[in-house]
Amino acid sequence: MGTLLAAVCGLLVAGGLVATVVGWRSPPVESGPRRRWNDFTLSRRFGGRRLAAAAGWVAAGVVAASVTGWPVLAVLAPVLGIGLPLLLGEPAQRDLDLLQALDRWVRTLAAILPTGRSIPDAIRFSLRQAPEVLAAPLALLVERLDDRWTVQQALTGLADDLDSADADAVIAALALAAERGGTGAHATLLALADSIQERLKALREIETERARPRIVVRQVSMISLVVLAGALLFGGGFFEPYGTGIGQVILAVLVAAYLASLLALRRIATARPRQRILRGPS
């Protein structure tokens, strides 16, 4: 009875952790295109599959705790099942995806301008062919232009929506092209597209170098898990000390230290955000 109660407590703790993470990462309630953009991002990060997997790991932890008599497994199983894929998986390539989308958009604008359209009209027309990543921010940009914002103000608002140093460089050049107008804008956009390609090439090379330590850590982790699983199946006496109260505390501390080391490694391998150059008024 005591084991079952401890398992239920572990279930509640693990479920609370999952709910806390989801609530912490959820964006504030908004309206209009920006809300659709945030909803899309949230569904990508915490889709139904991930929530179902989290529930499955919580249930597995409860079953493991009930079978083995180790209450700590009710917490460790979901923590490891949810945490390891996040820590060992490939990080989201937001800057790379955003630059690729901006490259397509800028080339679309460059192709539209020779038809006689101005920069604002070209922006409105490009919305039909906007990349998925930029669809919602560009829809908001068009709304601002229709509300009689100047091109400079609307583009600065777009920079704030995207919140990326690389996007700032692109949008600043686009704002300069809009200010010049005429054939100069077309030439500026073509040069901007070439500059984006160079930045994309550099980013891909950087990400390739960063992926190497992640691959090594993933391989070492998988080997360690296989060895521990083999020891559990064929040498159960190895884990007997962890069946005591103090042993389970030590086990929890070791797992926490392992996850903390993976988190530290991930932080080291993650690029620090660069200083932005465009910011709208507060």
Image: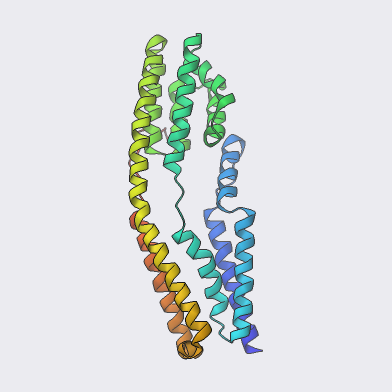
Camera sees residue 272: no
Quadrant in which the C terminus is drawn: top left
Say which quarter of the image contains residue 153.
top left
Indicate the position of residue 178 as horizontal and vertical percent values. Answer: 42, 17
Q: Nearer the viewer, residue 141 or 87?
A: 87
Colour scheme used in the picture? rainbow
Q: Nearer the viewer, residue 196 or 123?
A: 196
Q: In the image, is residue 165 above or below residue 180?
A: below
Q: Quadrant of the N terminus?
A: bottom right
Residue 1 seen: yes
What x and y, as percent, mark residue 120? 50, 18
Q: Residue at x 48, y 36 (%)?
A: 161
The answer to which image quadrant residue 146 occupies is top right
- Residue 248's place in the image compared with 168, above or below, is below
Closer to the camera in the image, 41 or 221 = 221
Q: Total of numbered circles in the picture?
A: 0
The image position of residue 26, as x and y in percent, is 55, 52
Q: Residue 195: x percent and y percent?
A: 34, 28
Residue at horizontal 42 percent and vertical 78 percent from the top? 253
Identity of the residue drawn at 51% across and 85% down: 234
| Identity of the residue drawn at 60% across and 39% down | 36
Q: Is residue 110 above or below residue 16?
A: above
